[in-house]
Amino acid sequence: MTTTPLNVEALRKDFPLLARTVHDRPIVYLDSASSALQPHAVIDAMAKYYETTHANVHRGVYATAEEATHLYENARLVVGRFIGAPEPAHEIVFTKNTTESLNLVAHTWARTNLLAGDPILLTEMEHHANIVPWLMLAEERGLELRYIPLDGEGRLDLSDLETLVAGVKLVGVSAMSNVLGTINPIAEIARAAHANGAVVVVDGAQLVPHAPIDVTTLGADFLAFSGHKMMGPTGIGVLWARRELLNAMPPFLGGGGMILDVKLDSFRAAPPPARFEAGTPPIAEAVGLSAAVDYLSDIGMDRIRAHELELTNYALARLDEKLGSDCRIFGPPPGLDRGGVISLAYRDVHAHDVAQVLDQFGVCVRPGHHCAKPLMRKLGVQATARASLSLFSDEHDIEVLIEGLVEAGRLFG
Amino acid sequence: MGDFDDLYREIILDHYRSPRNRGELESPPAHRVEGFNPLCGDEVVISLLVEDGKLADLKIAGSGCSISQSSASLMSSAVKGKSVDEVHQLIHTFKGMMSIHEAHLGKDGEAEEPVAIDPNELGELAALQGVVKFPVRIKCATLSWNALAQGLDEVAAEAS
């Protein structure tokens, strides 16, 4: 890597929550894949907004209402530029989270374009958010669901892609697995999908916060991600889509803000993105997300990715060195197609017990099925304990994790 | 580590490592009921044989964390051979022990009347009292108990 390394010690001071202790030990936050922590910059931006500016957007003509509208619409531009959106003002839709963004696509684009018998192609490693909306639509419309299988190392097995993608109208794929850390070859899948006339819906919840993304080269037609996983607040998510797709889509939720005109017997929908943002939007959250994007951009996504890649490799090597075959790691071996998500099983200790012991060490990990039950079945486990890295994670965090795992082995062994 | 040691008491670890009444009974005549914790994927399968108003036999299958598995094992030892009425009373008492803490948290606003726990009545089950300090784990501890209550209700419904 040719990037300048992060000064993690200095960056850690940006996160007030890292100053607290848990069970009299410094917190070791290894759960950013669930939800990231917020830097002062985000918390301060939201507090300042509420203290100086708050008003509803797109409504009032008074000064603070104008300012609030400007901040909200500016957030759209900031977020759009962050992912290389060619026309951010028209292509960025604010939602509640990734889940709502994906449901939006299912309810609008897919409802309009998919008919009984049409196949949809997903993957076996999808989060429930990129399976259940399609299952619901399949039930309603009689669609056929197909899945790209996994290979033995937790990558997508694309050997039958041409067959699987034939006749498909929509391909839904995660840019990075929230369980395995696998970074998927979206461009390659998208080429096959587009050759068949399918649109590509990418769940970017895990990758967008951790690596440089450019939608003009990614291959996606739709990209969904969440604010809170990229150090912004909860309650705001993003859907990016190509402008012509959004223009042709019917509204999602009905209400104020998404119309041009309403009569007693009809309505005319507003153009995108307003068409998809009924009701008062998450204004303060957009301000916070905008600050989070500025924070990440100032550090540099390439540097963040390089840091997390190096630390992932360190963690995988140390887990192997210290725990050997006692610790089973899911997902691909160290490499460029792996993000900082480390799912593990320690001996036969249940993930909940592992996580409970780790909590005594101040270590925050996520136990469970990670909203990916089909993947869990495929892996042959009920649950895993997942440690996930962030720009503020360091080697010490990994050492405390290992210390806790050894204790779990002692207690339950 | 006081609360933590209270959670993983030796009796609990013992029942986790050496679960009692493991397996399944032939069904029928036994009744089979499944319990499921969608949050963590823990599963419990209870086979229960009710004869002459008594829980003549039961077996536990399934898998999950130490709390759900030890609770199921402790439960099986406690209820086997008891009358159905006594089992219902024990389920009520056990769930009362688990919900005291919820009342302290004021989750539903109104604090419930704390259920008086008679340690003699609960015996080894009292070891699970430490779970109430870990609200997330209460569902693990009550999984098998809810399944047993459901199973007894189903048996009663079939008989009537």
Image (tube, coloured by chain):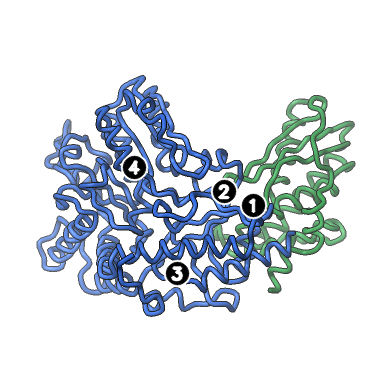
Chain colours: A blue, B green
Residue B126 location (% of width, % of height): 80, 60
Q: Of label 1 and label 2, which has the lower sequence position? A: 2
Q: Which residue is mark 1?
A: B139
Report whether A284 appears left or right of B86. Answer: left
- Residue drawn at the location 30% of the way across and 63% of the way down: A302
Residue A65 location (% of width, % of height): 15, 64
Q: Are marks 1 and 4 in contact (CB under 8 Å)?
A: no
Q: Which residue is mark 4?
A: A102
Q: For the residue marked with disc 4, what is the amino acid? A: Leu
Chain letter for mark 4, please: A
Q: Which residue is mark 3?
A: A393
Furthest residue in direction left, as rendered = A61
Quarter of the image for residue B25 reads top right
Report whether A176 appears left or right of A78. Answer: right
Q: CA distance from mark 1 to mark 4?
A: 30 Å
What count of labels does the image hold? 4
- Residue drawn at the location 45% of the way across and 63% of the way down: A389
Q: For the residue marked with disc 3, what is the amino acid? A: Ser
Quarter of the image for residue A262 reads top left
Q: Are marks 1 and 2 in contact (CB under 8 Å)?
A: yes
Q: For the residue marked with disc 2, what is the amino acid? A: Leu
- Of tags 1 and 2, the one toward the viewer is 2
Task: Pick the residue in front: B54 or B112.
Answer: B54
Q: CA distance from mark 2 to mark 4?
A: 22 Å
